[in-house]
């Protein structure tokens, strides 16, 4: 009888081990999923005499401009722009090789490079936008602005 109890216990143990399946583990959530807030704009392409290339600009303070991107695990996103008016833009996304591609429902597309350094996660727009800054009371300078978001 004792032998039968040991055999039954051994069989139950093996059954418990074989019921675990590695493929049933949940797929990890991509690093880009979550809320991203516009952190700054990096200036580039301005005349060297302006001495502002590489400077980080607080767009909310300087332009009253803000933006968030909510990236959901079902491969959809919503981007919210705040300036004088508030607007939303939705679409789908793809993430591969640290490149996030946003495909807007209206047909536009945007790409960002994901990076993580000392637990600070950032999305940097791949294409800077044209930007004009006042450099004196009578003159402006044209250059580019790269949007940087943080999680």
Image (cartoon, rainbow, N blue to C red):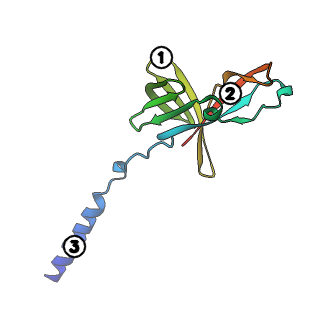
Front residue of this view, candidates 92 and 3: 92
Residue displayed at 33% across by 49% down: 24
Q: Earlier in the sequence, mark 3 or mark 2?
A: 3
Dot 1: element:
loop
Image disc number at residue 145: 2
Location of residue 55 (image quadrant): top right
Please give the residue where the numbered disc 3 appears in the rendered image.
9
For the residues labelled 1 and 2, the Cα–Cα distance comes to: 23 Å
The quarter of the rendered structure image containing the N terminus is: bottom left
The quarter of the rendered structure image containing the C terminus is: top right
Q: Earlier in the sequence, mark 1 or mark 2?
A: 1
Front residue of this view, candidates 33 and 20: 33
Dot 2: element:
strand
Residue displayed at 55% across by 25% down: 110
Q: How many marks?
A: 3
Please give the residue where the numbered disc 1 appears in the rendered image.
107
Dot in front, 3 or 2: 2
Q: Is residue 75 left or right of residue 124?
A: left
Q: Residues within 10 Å of mark 1 (few under 14, many from 20)?
A: few
- x then y, percent, for residue 86: 48, 26
Location of residue 64 (image quadrant): top right
- x then y, percent, for residue 52: 79, 31
Dot 3: element:
helix
For the residues labelled 1 and 3, the Cα–Cα distance comes to: 62 Å
For the residues labelled 3 and 2, the Cα–Cα distance comes to: 68 Å
Dot in front, 1 or 3: 1
Residue displayed at 37% across by 50% down: 25
Instruction: Tell me whether the residue at label 3 lies in contact with that at label 2, contact meaning CB atoms closer than 8 angstroms.
Output: no
């Amino acid at each position: 009888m004792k032998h039968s109890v040991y055999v039954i216990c051994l069989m139950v143990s093996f059954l418990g081990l074989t019921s675990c399946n590695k493929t049933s583990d949940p797929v990890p959530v991509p690093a880009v999923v979550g809320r991203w807030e516009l952190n700054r704009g990096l200036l580039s392409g301005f005349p060297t005499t302006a001495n502002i290339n590489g400077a980080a600009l607080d767009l909310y303070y300087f332009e009253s401009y803000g933006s968030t991107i909510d990236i959901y695990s079902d491969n959809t996103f919503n981007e919210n722009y705040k300036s004088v008016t508030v607007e939303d833009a939705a679409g789908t996304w793809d993430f591969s090789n640290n490149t996030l591609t946003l495909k807007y429902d209206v047909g536009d597309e945007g790409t960002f490079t994901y990076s993580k350094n000392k637990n600070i996660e950032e999305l940097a727009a791949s294409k800077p936008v044209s930007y004009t800054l006042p450099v004196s009371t009578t003159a402006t300078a044209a250059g580019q602005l790269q949007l940087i978001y943080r999680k």
